[in-house]
Amino acid sequence: MRQAEKERQNMKVCADRITEREAAGKCRGEGKAESAVLLAACLVFYLWLPVMDGYVWCKDSLSYTTMDISREPLYPTFLALLRALPFPWGEDGYLYAAVVLQSLLAAYTAWRLGLAAARIAGGVQKDPCSGRARLVSRMMMAAGAASQWMIVILTRFIAQRGSSYQESIMTEGLGLSLYVLFLLQLWRWHEEGKKRNLLLTVCMLVILISLRKQLLVAGVLFALAAFVLDGLVRRAWRRFLYQMLAIILVMASVAGLDCAYNAAVRGVWMQHTGNSMGALCTLLYISDEEDAARIEDETLREEFTAIWQEADRQGLLMADAGENPDWVMLTTHYADSYDAIGYGILHPVLLERIDAEDPSRSDPERYQRLDEQEMEMRNALLTAHPDRFFKLWVGNLRKGLVNSVARENTILNWCALGLYAVYLGLSFYLLRFRRERAVRSVLLFAGLVLGGIVLNCVVVGAVIFPQPRYMIYSMGLFYTALALLLHAAWKCRRTSPAWR
């Protein structure tokens, strides 16, 4: 009798295991079907705009197609490779091909973000294959993809920009998607700890920084995450040192690619130019005429005076922003003045003197000399007015934080403040449940997203005006993370005491 009872129990256990495997297989099968539907939806959504609008030519597009020496190498190379291929759409057929490829990348990115959101949310479920869990997974998958779609709708229709970034001939066509893929890869590295994920993250960093120097913030985020998570939290100092070595390798690779690009295009082993211009324009904006005394070189001192007087005549300096302007007025005036100072006054004045010095200089030599003069002037002005710089930087930081999640205006400024407050409140609430791996996964993702936003605002606010196209790299990620935080907080309140 005992033997028969034991056999019946064994048969029941085997039957239960078979049922669990069948349920898991059915769950995975449904997940694949949902993933395929989402991918198809993303392809349709992103491809109809370039079909309708074609490629969109922007103010900076010419500098990429002509491989201007001030541009990072990746995007001009991307366009040059397409230009070398035979397309049946005329002389500008390669530009149509570029926006189609950018749209395909955007569709893939939205799909990947949707899958990642579903995976993170699924980890919070006690029974990932239950009907309710599958519904939540579908909702999060859709929310992740829709957060990227929202950027297109916002820029193309609501903001009346007339085009979306993936159909524009500019670095954002690739950068907005590649940054999202980088952050997902960085999350996977810290979540899973696999060397493959670290290698892919490092490769993504090389691509991002070679695409646009603003995306150095991705490298800073990588290093900061390594220090906080592996250095302070996990005390895995060896792993932290490996990542610091990886950052050094990334920067060396970026410099090498930059120099190799210019050697191939111009026959000169040099990096792209213009890296000092952003900070110098900001320092000129907050300067006084008396700051010329800080510059040791007499010729450069005369050039500064000529630049400052012309900027003052055109009302482009901080003193022209009004008496006691609020941060909105100040940052708006600064944004309007930035390009006018840099491209309208600074470059013409310095290049005129450079050409007068030696008319036989080649273009690379001219711009190398321009870099030297801009760097010397920047270093001389760096400590001139720290109070003015801080006031401008704080205003830019506030504007950048708003533009990262909405659009700067009277109502949305307060909406953005509320969104950040909810985001931080949910994060602090979930820290109570940090012993649960699923909650830690949500907090890791949300922390990386917020860290990327803050770092981008801090860096951009210090050297250039934080217009929306510089700030929306993390916009879709922010709303995806907010949805995951809301779901995790709701689940933690409703679930069993085991979560508590």
Image: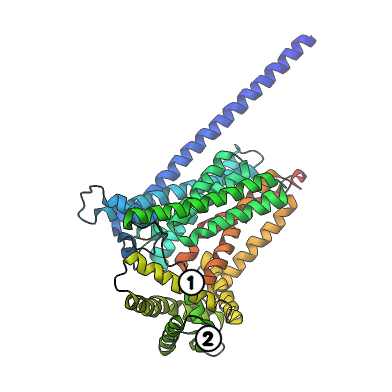
Disc assigned to residue 93: none
Q: Is residue 189 left or right of residue 429?
A: left
Q: Position of residue 207 (x, y in %)?
A: 45, 51
Label 2 to label 1: alpha-carbon separation = 16 Å
Q: Nearer the viewer, residue 208 or 284?
A: 284
Q: Nearer the viewer, residue 6 or 144?
A: 144
Instruction: Give amino acid for label 1.
Output: Met
Q: Position of residue 408 (x, y in %)?
A: 51, 73
Instruction: Give amino acid for label 2.
Output: Ala
Q: Earlier in the sequence, mark 2 or mark 1?
A: 2
Q: Position of residue 189 (x, y in %)?
A: 59, 44
Marks 2/1 in contact by CB < 8 Å: the verdict is no
Q: Secondary structure at mark 2?
A: helix
Which residue is drawn at the image coordinates 29% and 57% (left, top)?
Answer: 52
Graded by Cα atoms within 10 Å as few (under 14), some (14 to 19) or many (20 or more), the crowding at tag 2 reads: some
- Residue identified by numbered label 2: 293
Q: Secondary structure at mark 1?
A: helix
Where 421 sits versus 323, above or below? above
Residue 146 appears in the picture as rendered = no
Give the quadrant of residue 2: top right
Q: Is residue 218 left or right of residue 241?
A: left
Where 26 sits versus 346, above or below? above
Q: Is residue 263 left or right of residue 151?
A: left
- Residue identified by numbered label 1: 375
Q: Nearer the viewer, residue 54 or 493?
A: 54
